[in-house]
Amino acid sequence: MHGWATDLFPYCRSITGDGVRRTLAYLRERLPFITMHEVPSGTTAFDWTVPREWNIREAYIENEKGERIIDFRKCNLHVVGYSIPVDAWMPLGELQEYLHSLEDQPDAIPYVTSYYKERWGFCISHNQRQKLAEGRYHVVIDSDLKDGHLTYGECIIPGATEKEVFFSTYVCHPSMANNELSGPVVLTYIAKWLMSQPRRYTYRLIFIPETIGSITYLSRHLETLKQRVVVGFNLSCIGDERTYGFVASPYGNTLADRIAQNVLDNLGVEYTVHPFLTRGSDERQYCSPGVDLPLITLCRSKYGTYPEYHTSLDDLKLVTPEGLAGGCNYVKRCIEVAEMNDIYRVTCCGEPQLGKRGLYPSLSTKKSGASVAAMMDLITYADGTNDLVSISKLVGQPVWDLNDIALRLKTAGLLKKMEESTFTRSSAM
């Protein structure tokens, strides 16, 4: 995953354009079953309109000696996203109006965009900006903004049922590693892993431009998603080593909330649950009124909360192989819990006799009861109404351990799996 991120890091991505297509083409080399879709500029998507397509070839600022003080080819964050073309000479005082820097992070190049208002500009570290000498500067942005397409990628991995687990991540930011590339590379790895796993559920995975991409996708697939999606996860900023977390759903009570909370509790890692009021990624769209999908955002350091966010400091030293592996394991565990989360009902009346079924030690000692405590606890709450995630919280055992016990009890004829999937429930338990 880190190698993929390294390859993709130089690409100049935006909400439309060739950078998105190159990124999706790269991912499709690893996942041949990704399909690419093009939505024309001007297409209505609910209350939004697909914008014109932006592409950039070159951009720089030169001083009077012909020395390039800013070069887009060295760092694509140097140009304000969606900048219109410019080729002009101007004095430093005028140029300053088009420069963006961060006084509190003087070594960082900020990430700035202007998707829906035509303008141009450059981004520069504040230290470099302070050193600019008086004189005239040649500013050039060789770009175009014209009718084209918004591009997104989609892959459907069939399961035993049409009910779906939905994953979304975004491919619209230039050279930033955690905020951009961690989501796509983790989801690509997850897709490859899913192909080797038995699957109860169908998996829908999309790679989209943030905000306008999710809105466009919803406008084309909303009814299908509302009918089929039982749990959903948006992936963002999931590749650093600092912490774990998730952005909760509006009421914090969907199955996605419960699964993520349960997984993090049982992984024994430091984590933060971020309330929906701190939302900022595509959970905004998937949980908006009228959409209301059961979805949360999985992350490590949440977007907007770590100092490198939306700057050139969000690089491949911040995102590490270990960080990506931890994020990937977090996602895998959420999938595994979703797949094994059933409702069971005990088949006998009263406490079952485990010994005659070979499930209880034949020699009674002080320790024999403790050895089957988890099994007895599972039986206690297997009343046909509690799913394994709920029971896990009640008895303090990981779902994956309870699932192994449940399968043993089912084989022994003591548990019956209820036919109705737990995914129709949204208990806050």
Image (tube, rainbow, N blue to C red):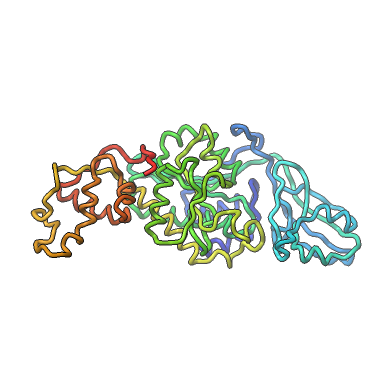
Residue 143 image offset from top left, x and y in percent: 75, 50
Identify the residue shown where x is 35% and y is 51%: 337
Residue at 27%, 52% (x, y): give it: 403
Residue 28 placed where, x, y %?
Answer: 51, 53
The answer to which of 254 and 285 lies nearer the viewer is: 254
Q: Is residue 139 left or right of residue 307?
A: right
Q: Residue at x 14, y 47 (%)?
A: 351
In the displayed structure, would residue 365 be above or below residue 393?
below
Q: Quadrant of the C terminus?
A: top left
On screen, residue 39 above or below 19: above
Query: Residue at left 87%, top 65%?
Result: 133
Pick the front one: 277 or 339 = 277
Query: How far across and down, in percent of the image, does residue 158 sit?
Result: 38, 44
Q: Is residue 268 left or right of residue 97?
A: left
Q: How many marks?
A: 0
Image coordinates of residue 127 in percent, x first then y, are 77, 66
